Image (cartoon, rainbow, N blue to C red):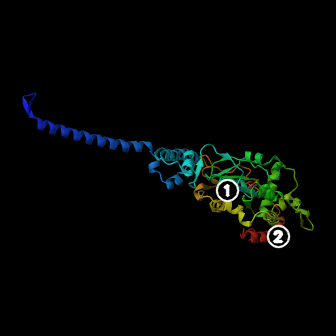
């Protein structure tokens, strides 16, 4: 059979069939290619970040400023979880379900979404007054896995009757994996504090910032003097009887520095390994070194390093290059690092002699030489 095409071309039936078959095959091939491209583009659009973000990158991202990190983590883990929930036919396991609801901490753990929950502290800086407790807490707060109450709650000494719910309410909200902390230096010398903290949680980690008891006493006195300029001199308050040289151990400025006496009280309830002693002197001369020990003790990743500090010549103390939630340098306020009055060197020597045996016992108990008697 033959037919006439426009332009007087004569085409046979066989030839038409051949042409139609070729057209069909190329049409099918185009469809196949188009389908492949759509699949590729579709999955890339569904998970723009998740496909390229590894667990270690998530951990690294946590070291960026907290707010930015949280937004990023919500987005990243949210999309990972969504992808798994959408794509897989299986019911999601607990990890995926958690991921759908949250984001990981610096340690890679998953956290619930939202602003978090107020929790009782898992670690408390219990002392000592004028040891450097504020500096330690301010430095620790830089860690993304630490949240701390701003003011001193004084729950275990002054406000115990208000109950644990009241205490918890003073705490900042935390996400799973973050540690709640507070500092109240007077706990260390409060007789009831160890039993009370133990009854809240026997696993509470305790931190004590200790400082040379003589300079601590002078610092304590300097604070009182700033509030009551009319008080008696340090020298006269130190002695029960200046002629006999008998020290007045009932004066709180003196008594607080007999660390072994107070420590004995804590050891009735807590084992030594649950108490960390931070050197107040080293906190000034090597803040990153002391912070390293504290982070280890709290089971935290060592994120706070010497890169976080600079020595402020005017202040005469180490300061933070960036405070928590800020990009500005931050030194402690003017009530921290006061100029001390000059004390009669004979009185200072008498106090050194008084504290020496207590210090020696303290070094023995803690296994650390603090160097106050060198
Ligand atoms: N980085 C930094 N900046 C300023 N001050 C610092 C710092 N590190 C430790 N210190 C020392 O902290 C002392 C105050 O201790 P506390 O914060 O424990 O005092 S308080 O008990 O809360 O009142 C305070 O005591 P004074 O020098 O006697 O004022 C400081 O010596």
**Residue 264 in picture, x, y percent from top left:** 81, 66
Label 1 beta carbon within 8 A of ligand 1: yes
Q: Earlier in the sequence, mark 1 or mark 2?
A: 1
Q: For marks 1 and 2, give the CA distance.
A: 28 Å
Crowding near the residue tagged with mark 2, few <14, some 14–19, many ≥20 C-alpha atoms within 10 Å = few
Q: Where on the picture, by quarter, is residue 341?
A: bottom right
Out of 302 and 128, give the one closest to the viewer. Answer: 302
**Residue 338 in picture, x, y percent from top left:** 74, 53
Residue at figure coordinates x 29%, y 40% from the top left: 31
Image quarter where the N terminus lies is top left
Image quarter where the C terminus lies is bottom right
Q: Is residue 343 visible to us here?
A: yes
Residue at figure coordinates x 19%, y 39% from the top left: 21
Label at residue 317: 1
**Residue 233 in picture, x, y percent from top left:** 86, 57
Horizontal relation, residue 176 to residue 38: left or right: right
Out of 118 and 132, give the one closest to the viewer. Answer: 118
Q: Residue furthest front?
A: 1
- Which quadrant contains ligand 1? bottom right
| Mark 1 secondary-structure assignment | strand
The residue to which callout 2 is attached is 353
Horizontal relation, residue 108 to residue 43: left or right: right
């Amino acid at each position: 059979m033959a037919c006439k095409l426009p332009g007087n071309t004569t085409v046979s039936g066989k030839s038409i069939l051949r042409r139609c078959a070729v057209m069909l095959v190329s049409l099918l091939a185009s469809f196949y290619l188009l389908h492949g491209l759509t699949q590729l583009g579709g999955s890339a659009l569904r998970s723009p970040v998740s496909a390229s973000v590894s667990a270690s990158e998530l951990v690294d991202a946590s070291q960026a400023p907290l707010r930015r990190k949280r937004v990023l983590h919500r987005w990243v883990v949210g999309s990972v979880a969504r992808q798994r929930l959408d794509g897989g036919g299986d019911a999601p396991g607990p990890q995926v379900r958690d991921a759908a609801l949250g984001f990981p901490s610096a340690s890679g753990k998953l956290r619930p979404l939202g602003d978090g929950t107020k929790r009782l502290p898992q670690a408390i800086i219990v002392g000592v007054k004028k040891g450097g407790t504020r500096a330690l807490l301010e430095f620790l707060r830089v860690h993304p896995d630490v949240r701390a109450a701003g003011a001193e709650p004084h729950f275990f000494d002054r406000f115990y009757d208000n109950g644990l719910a009241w205490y918890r309410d003073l705490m900042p909200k935390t996400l799973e994996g973050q540690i709640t902390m507070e500092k109240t230096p007077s706990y260390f010398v409060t007789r009831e504090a160890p039993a009370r903290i133990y009854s809240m949680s026997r696993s509470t980690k305790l931190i004590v910032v200790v400082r040379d008891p003589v300079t601590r006493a002078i610092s304590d006195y300097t604070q009182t003097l700033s509030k009551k300029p009319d008080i008696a001199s340090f020298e006269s308050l130190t002695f029960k009887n200046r002629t006999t040289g008998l020290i007045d151990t009932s004066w709180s400025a003196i008594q607080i520095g007999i660390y072994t006496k107070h420590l004995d009280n804590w050891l009735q309830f807590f084992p030594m390994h649950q108490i960390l002693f931070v050197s107040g002197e080293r906190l000034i001369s090597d803040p990153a070194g002391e912070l390293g020990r504290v982070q280890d003790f709290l089971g935290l990743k060592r994120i706070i390093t010497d890169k976080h500090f600079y020595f402020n010549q005017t202040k005469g103390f180490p300061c933070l290059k960036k405070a928590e939630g800020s990009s500005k340098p931050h030194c402690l306020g003017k009530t921290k690092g006061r100029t001390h009055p000059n004390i009669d060197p004979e009185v200072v020597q008498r106090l050194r002699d008084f504290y020496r045996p207590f210090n020696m016992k303290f070094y023995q108990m803690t296994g650390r030489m603090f160097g106050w008697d060198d």
